Amino acid sequence: MALRFAAGLALLCLSLAAVSSRSRRALEIGVYWGQGGSEGSLIDACATGNYQVVNIAFLNSFGGGRTPLLGLAGHCDPTTGGCTKLSKEIRSCQALGIKVLLSIGGGAGSYTLNSTDDAMSVAVYLWNNFLDGQSSSRPLGDAVLDGIDLAVAWDLSSKHWDTLAKALGKYRDQGNNKIYLSAAPQCPFPDSSLQPALSTGLFDYVWVQFFNNPPCEYSGGGGSRETLLASWNNWTTINASKVFVGLPAVPEVAVTGYIPPDVLRTRVLPELERSSKFGGVMLWSRAFDRGYSSAINPEVCGSVETRSASANDVAMLPMGNNYGGARGFKSCRGTCVIV
Ligand SMILES: *[C@@H]1O[C@H](CO)[C@@H](O)[C@H](O)[C@H]1NC(C)=O
Ligand SMILES: *[C@@H]1O[C@H](CO)[C@@H](O)[C@H](O)[C@H]1NC(C)=O
Ligand SMILES: *[C@@H]1O[C@H](CO)[C@@H](O)[C@H](O)[C@H]1NC(C)=O
């Protein structure tokens, strides 16, 4: 009964959010989480209400005969099963309407796809260990992630990402859940390693990295958006559902390409929104998002407030006690947030 009530409330909340946001072009915000112990927990990131997509970063060792390994610096130790505790948080995020993807790759790691066979076996591994498949040693436990993000940044000469994408695409038809595919190419167009994969047309989200790439990013001092927009106009031609701008959340996390939030909101987003492919903003990263996501969209919720903890409206959601209690839901930019 309580479960049905909570589920009904969540549905009501999602449909209210859909109605109230119809008048306005949706700006989705994604974030990478997993590369810093100081960034707080996954559920705390989700509970801010500021994000619609969270990429768990990274599975940074795989392919070429390696034993696949998560690198969630400072959060948990995957070698002792320590990251299975994240299942509950992943399900909690999903209950709030947030998509949680596993990002594979990253800037520091050890991964290659040596052949098409290698790409196929990585796809099987991802399906069994993070998606709808079965494995006795799922690194993040039983939670079924919403999809896979390709963040190829270590060996840019590596190939076969298209084979991996197509193999994951085949699983889409088998699973109970939709499998989202996303990718994080660099802004010089086309991206040398990911373009063959992107050409498959299978990607739901493409977050293009518009920083540390002077030929195609916003250039700070002079305040010029022209190089970014010229590149953006190429990116919106790709066969993908939504294209996001990937940006640093603070200046110090990038060498170049930071865009102050007010500049992004008033001078850049209005231009990007001209394209029907525009999806939103992907931030690097949760550890550095000290107000950027709130500043670029005044409709984000900010932090979850705790009120009393007597009734039990949402206790059946999988967040556990910290997020139970008499709080109810507030609709927030397309998701529901506990208040
Ligand atoms: C895979 O490719 C990498 C880089 O090209 C190479 O170092 C490694 O030996 C290869 N592994 C296998 C199992 O072929
Ligand atoms: C985009 O990709 C999809 C899926 O592969 C394909 O069906 C469609 O024809 C492609 N569209 C274009 C314009 O290439
Ligand atoms: C746009 O894409 C074409 C290749 O399709 C490339 O030659 C050109 O340099 C690109 N321009 C920008 C500004 O990225």
Image (cartoon, grey):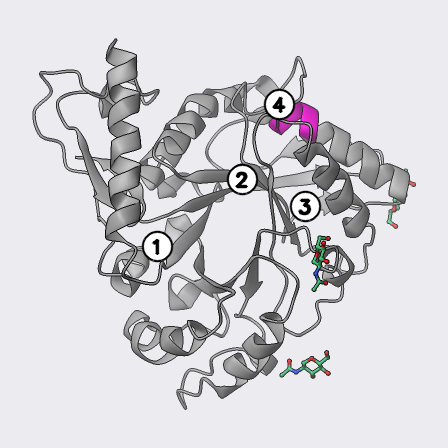
Cβ atoms at labels 2 and 4 below 8 Å apart:
no
* Nearer-N-terminus badge (4/3): 4
Residue 31 image position (x, y, % from top left): 44, 50
* Kind of residue at disc 3: Gly
* Kind of residue at disc 1: Asp
Image region (quadrant) for ligand 3: bottom right
Name the disc covering residue 41, or none. none
Looking at the rendered image, the quarter that the N terminus falls into is: top left
Q: Residue at x 13, y 32 (%)?
A: 306
Q: Is residue 212 magenta?
A: no
Cβ atoms at labels 3 and 1 below 8 Å apart:
no
* Nearer-N-terminus badge (2/4): 4
* Nearer-N-terminus badge (3/2): 2
Image-based side of 66 in relation to 75, left or right: right
Separation of residues labelled 3 and 1 (CA atoms):
24 Å
Nearer the viewer's eye, disc 3 or disc 2?
2
Q: Does residue 15 appear anywhere in the picture?
A: yes
* Kind of residue at disc 2: Leu
Q: Which residue is mark 2?
A: 101
Separation of residues labelled 1 and 4 (CA atoms):
29 Å
* Nearer-N-terminus badge (3/1): 3
Q: Which residue is mark 4?
A: 79
Q: Nearer the viewer, residue 146 or 42?
A: 146
Label 1 lies in ligand 3 vicinity (Cβ under 8 Å):
no
Majority secondary structure of magenta residues: helix
Residue 79 image position (x, y, % from top left): 62, 23
Residue 80 image position (x, y, % from top left): 58, 18
Q: Which residue is mark 3?
A: 109
Q: Does residue 67 appear anywhere in the picture?
A: no
Image-based side of 42 in relation to 325, left or right: right
